[in-house]
Image (spheres, helix red, strand yellow):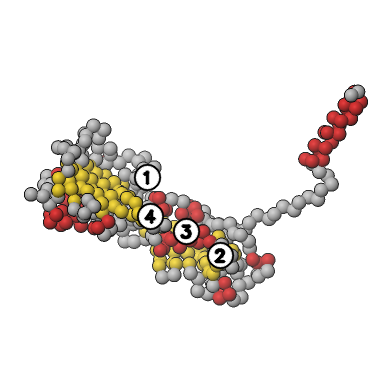
Amino acid sequence: MNLKATLALIILAVASIVVYLFNPFSNEESKQPPKPWFYQVSVDDMTSISIDHKDKSESFIKTPSGTWAFDWDILIPPSHNRWGGIAFILGGPQTQRDLTETTTLIENPAQYGLDNPHTVVRIGLTLDRTLEFRLGDKTTDGRHHYGQIIGFPQLFLIADTWGNVLARLATEPPYPAWYIDRPTDTISEINIFPKTEDASKDEGQLNFKRQRNGTWEITDYLVSTESRPANNDKWQKLLPIIKAPSGVDVAVHKVEDRDYSQWGLGDNSAAVEIRFRNQTEQGTTYTDGSLLLIGDIDPSGEYYYGKSSEENTSQPVLLFPKEWVETALGLYDDIPYAE
């Protein structure tokens, strides 16, 4: 092949690439407009959240420390596993499309189920502002809800999954595991760990375990790995007290540096672990648990400082009732063995 032919082929190849990448003859594709936002608010502006879903409701409030808690007399924090990210989700979703192209006003709310919405969410904002939105009927494909912000006429399509996440806050509130007062027959195991000088070397553990026949056995690992039967009468009187720390309060909502030593809380603290049967949304049964660290007694003498051992989050300093702490830790002094 001569030089002229080679150059011609090279020029043709380059021209083909240019046309492919920068085709001057093609019509410029119109860019799709961005999906509109249902609403947008800053997480920092939020001060409270309330959700009504059918006959269920729940409310949350931002504490002075900037954390979130149930809006009760005692500001119990929600479970981090369930709550983490909820405030950002509530910052506002993008919608599938804005129906104002064809409907500028919602003249008949009943047409979209917005006259009696199944979900109503109110978000309190700084400067005494409030944002309220409603979710009505599902669309015919079942993948979206009709949505409206109170005070505005626009109609939006909101993803069904987003609405379900919010509704679940009311139907299945995100209680922390240690807060729930579970039926006694769901408790499967309790472990008592005494305070120690060196947690890595101390093998102290008092284990109470439910057997398949419903009886309980006790293992004191400081003495032996062999278990012994529990005195059923004594244990059945103790279990309702130990299974959950009823009457917990909150001393400090957020510890910025995560140093809990001033409350006597650390790796060498005494601890109580409560294990229980739980169930997934699909109905699968599994064993879950909550490990609670116990620190110094508080100045009132009615509580002990404590915290959940849940990792990767800044846990609040809790106040555990004296009766619960001393009943649980006192088991080492009077182990309820069967005679």
Residue 53, labelled with which disc?
none
Split into 4 quadrants, where in the image is the N terminus? top right
Type of amino acid at the residue the image marks with label 4: Thr
Using a 10 Å C-alpha cutoff, classify the residue at mark 3 as few (fewer than 14 neighbours), some (14 to 19) or many (20 or more).
few
Q: Is residue 158 above or below residue 107?
A: above
Q: Which residue is mark 3?
A: 165
Using a 10 Å C-alpha cutoff, classify the residue at mark 2 as few (fewer than 14 neighbours), some (14 to 19) or many (20 or more).
few
Say what secondary structure mark 4 lies in: loop
User: Residue, x 20% and y 47% (percent of image)?
Assistant: 208
Q: Which residue is mark 4?
A: 284
User: Residue, x 24% and y 40% (percent of image)?
Assistant: 269
Between marks 2 and 1 in the image, the one whose residue lies nearer the viewer: 2
User: Residue, x 45% and y 63% (percent of image)?
Assistant: 167
Type of amino acid at the residue the image marks with label 2: Gly
Q: Is residue 233 left or right of residue 254?
A: left
| Cα–Cα span, label 3 and label 2 | 16 Å
Say what secondary structure mark 2 lies in: loop
Between marks 3 and 4 in the image, the one whose residue lies nearer the viewer: 4
